[in-house]
Image (spheres, helix red, strand yellow):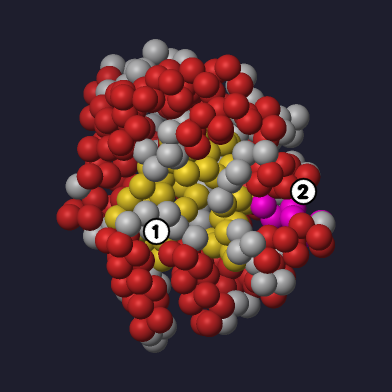
C-alpha cells in the first residue's frame, strides 16, 4: 500500500489519458488529429509550454456532456486510489469549456456526480475548486462566478491558474472579494514562473489560504520567513516544474531546501496525464532525486492533510485526524 496522502493541486482536465480521449471522441463523433492512442501518447511528450497548452486545450474538445466529465473524474479517482490518495481537492477550468459552448452546469454537475460517489467507490473524500483563467479578463472571471451560482453547493473554493507572467493576482481582486462574500475558500497559483511578489500579492490582495506552486518564494528570504510564520501551505508539483522547464532537472528541485527552511510543503501531480506521473509516482521520483528519507515523506503526507480544507465541520476534523493517524502508523516496509 502506498503512503496515504491528500492531493491538493490537480487539474481534472490534466488527467485525460489518450485511451479515454479516444473513447470520448468516438462517442461524441469527434475526429482527433492523431491516428491512434499510440500517436497521441507520443504527442504527450511535448517539450515546451506552448505545445503543452495546444494539446491540453485541443483535447478538451472531447469533453461535452455531464457523462464525459463524470467519467473523466471517475477515471482520475480510480487511479488516485491506487496511488494512496485518501482525499482530493480537484481543480477545474470552467472558462475553457464555456468558450466551447459547454455550459458550466454540465461541467460542475458531471464532475459532482463522480465526486459524490467517490468515498463509496474509491475510498477518497473530495472537494471541488473552480479556477479562473488568469490570461482571461477580470470581467470574464466575474461572469463565471455568477454563472456558477446555482451550483455553489458543489464547490468549496476558487483558484487562479494558466499563464502567470503579465497577469498579477491583483487583476482578480474583485472576483476574489465576491467569492469570499459567498463563503468560498481561496487559493491561487503564484510564484511558479511569476516573481515572488505575486505570492505576496495573492496573500495580501486576494486573501488566499494556500499558494499553488510558490517555489520562487525561495528568492525572497523575508517572504520565506512570513510563509513559515503564517504556516501558509505550498502545493508543489515537482514533475510539472521539470516538464514545463521551471527547473532543469528534478535533482535541482528546491523541495528539500524548502522543507529545511520550515515551509509547509505538499507534493502533487498538477496535470498527471501530461507530466509523467501521478502523485505517488511523484513521491517516488522526489525520494530518489532528492534523497528524501522516510520521515520527510511522512512529513509531506501529514502536511497534505493539514493543508486540506477538511476543517469546515467536526466531521471534517475527525476525518482529517483519522487520515493523519494513518500517516503516523504507516509502515514503509
Ligand atoms: Zn497547476
**Residue at (60, 77) in percent of width and height:** 292
SS label for mark 1: loop
* Residue closest to the eye, 119 or 284: 119
Residue labelled with disc 2: 196
Residue labelled with disc 1: 311
Q: Is mark 1 within 8 Å of ligand 1?
A: no
Extent of the magenta region: 214-219
Q: Quadrant of residue 134?
A: top right
**Residue at (68, 27) in percent of width and height:** 171
**Residue at (38, 58) in percent of width and height:** 310
> Looking at the magenta stretch, what is its main secondary structure?
helix
Q: Quadrant of residue 68?
A: top left
In this view, 287 is above or below 277? below
Could you tell which of marks 1 and 2 lies nearer the N-terminus? 2
> Where does residue 142 sit, x and y in percent of width and height?
52, 21
Q: Is residue 107 left or right of residue 132?
A: left
* Residue closest to the eye, 215 or 276: 215
Q: Is residue 76 left or right of residue 249?
A: left
Amino acid at each position: 500500500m502506498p503512503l496515504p496522502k491528500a492531493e491538493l493541486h490537480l487539474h481534472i482536465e490534466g488527467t485525460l489519458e489518450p485511451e479515454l480521449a479516444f473513447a470520448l471522441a468516438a462517442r461524441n463523433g469527434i475526429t482527433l488529429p492523431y491516428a491512434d492512442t499510440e500517436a497521441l501518447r507520443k504527442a504527450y511528450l511535448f517539450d515546451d509550454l506552448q505545445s503543452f497548452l495546444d494539446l491540453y486545450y485541443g483535447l478538451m474538445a472531447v469533453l461535452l456532456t455531464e457523462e464525459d466529465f463524470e467519467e473523466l473524474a471517475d477515471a482520475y479517482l480510480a487511479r488516485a486510489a491506487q496511488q494512496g490518495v485518501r482525499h482530493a481537492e480537484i481543480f477545474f477550468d470552467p472558462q475553457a469549456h464555456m468558450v466551447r459552448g459547454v455550459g458550466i452546469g454540465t461541467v460542475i454537475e458531471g464532475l459532482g456526480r463522480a465526486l459524490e460517489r467517490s468515498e463509496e467507490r474509491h475510498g477518497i473524500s473530495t472537494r471541488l475548486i473552480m479556477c479562473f483563467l488568469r490570461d482571461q479578463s477580470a470581467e470574464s472571471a466575474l461572469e463565471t462566478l455568477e454563472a456558477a451560482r446555482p451550483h455553489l453547493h458543489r464547490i468549496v473554493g476558487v483558484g487562479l491558474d494558466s499563464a502567470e507572467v503579465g497577469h498579477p493576482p491583483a487583476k482578480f481582486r474583485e472576483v476574489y472579494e465576491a467569492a469570499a462574500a459567498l463563503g468560498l475558500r481561496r487559493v491561487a497559483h503564484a510564484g511558479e514562473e511569476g516573481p515572488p511578489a505575486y505570492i505576496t500579492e495573492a496573500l495580501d490582495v486576494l486573501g488566499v489560504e494556500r499558494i499553488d506552486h510558490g517555489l520562487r518564494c525561495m528568492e525572497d528570504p523575508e517572504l520565506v520567513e512570513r510563509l513559515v510564520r503564517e504556516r501558509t501551505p505550498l502545493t508543489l508539483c515537482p514533475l510539472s516544474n521539470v516538464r514545463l522547464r521551471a527547473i532543469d532537472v528534478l535533482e535541482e528541485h528546491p523541495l528539500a531546501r524548502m522543507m529545511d527552511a520550515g515551509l509547509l510543503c505538499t507534493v502533487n501531480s498538477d496535470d498527471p496525464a501530461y507530466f509523467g506521473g501521478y502523485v505517488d509516482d511523484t513521491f517516488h521520483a522526489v525520494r530518489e532525486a532528492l534523497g528524501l528519507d522516510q520521515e520527510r515523506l511522512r512529513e509531506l503526507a501529514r502536511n497534505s492533510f493539514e493543508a486540506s480544507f477538511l476543517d469546515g465541520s467536526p466531521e471534517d476534523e475527525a476525518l482529517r485526524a483519522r487520515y493523519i493517524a494513518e500517516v503516523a502508523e504507516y509502515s514503509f516496509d
